Amino acid sequence: MQKTSALPKFFLLLCLGLSSTLAYSADKEWVTLIDGTTGMDNFNILGDANWSAQMGAIEATAGNGASFLVSKESYSDFSLRIEFWASDDANSGIFMRCQDPSSVNDRNCYEANIYDQRPDPAYGTGGIVHIAPVAEPRPKAGGKWNIYLLTLQGDHLVVELNGEKTVDVRDNLFASGPFALQWGRGTLRFRKVEIMEL
């Protein structure tokens, strides 16, 4: 009686496992929430900033206190890709996994900051406020188009600004919630906002 090796069967099972993993990964895709002229219907407006579609972007230039575009959906594990323009004096941020969509702040959300002139620059542009300072030389976003790539997977938080990693940290304070785009001061434009759930 001829012996058959278990090795080919093992490789077959391994290949089937890999192909199903690859198929699962291929199912993940970017979902566009703002495309430059439309998209505010995917958000609730909190505060009274003058959000409008201008110059191929969703823009805010004035308001009384902080204002937010808060996503209508909640997310846990995701990558968020945002193309934004900020004036030199802008105070803004991307707030993630917010615990109360009616009261967004840097204590009940993770905030990837956009604030070149922050009095404490350690948590300025590129940092996560109260969680992860940004190292020197600190990046600046004012006066140009920028791309934020923000990835939150479990307790792993990664911030990339214009292709440079500024934060890579572990923190388990918040597990899920909506995200919010902030106007606090200056001029802010968001021309593309995309999310991929992981």
Image: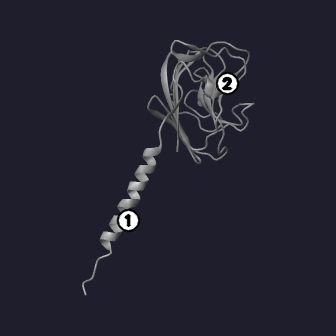
Which quadrant: the N terminus? Answer: bottom left
How far across and down, in percent of the image, does residue 36 sit?
52, 20
Q: Which residue is mark 2?
A: 68
From the top left corner, tell me how far across and down residue 69 is, in percent: 65, 25
Query: Nearer the observer, disc 1 or disc 2?
Result: 1
> As shown in the figure, which amino acid type bears the numbered disc 2?
Phe
User: In the structure shown, which secondary structural element does the residue marked by tag 2 occupy?
Assistant: strand
* Disc sitting over residue 130 in the figure: none
In the picture of the structure, the residue carrying the numbered disc 1 is 13
Q: Residue at horizontal 41%, vertical 60%?
A: 17
**Location of residue 124 in the rendering, given as x and y in whole percent from the top left corner:** 59, 27
Looking at this view, is 32 or 160 the one in front?
A: 32
Q: CA distance from mark 1 to mark 2?
A: 49 Å
Q: Residues within 10 Å of mark 2 (few under 14, many from 20)?
A: many
CB under 8 Å between discs 1 and 2 = no
| Residue depicted at x 61% and y 23% | 40
- Type of amino acid at the residue the image marks with label 1: Leu
| 78 sits left or right of 176 in the view | left
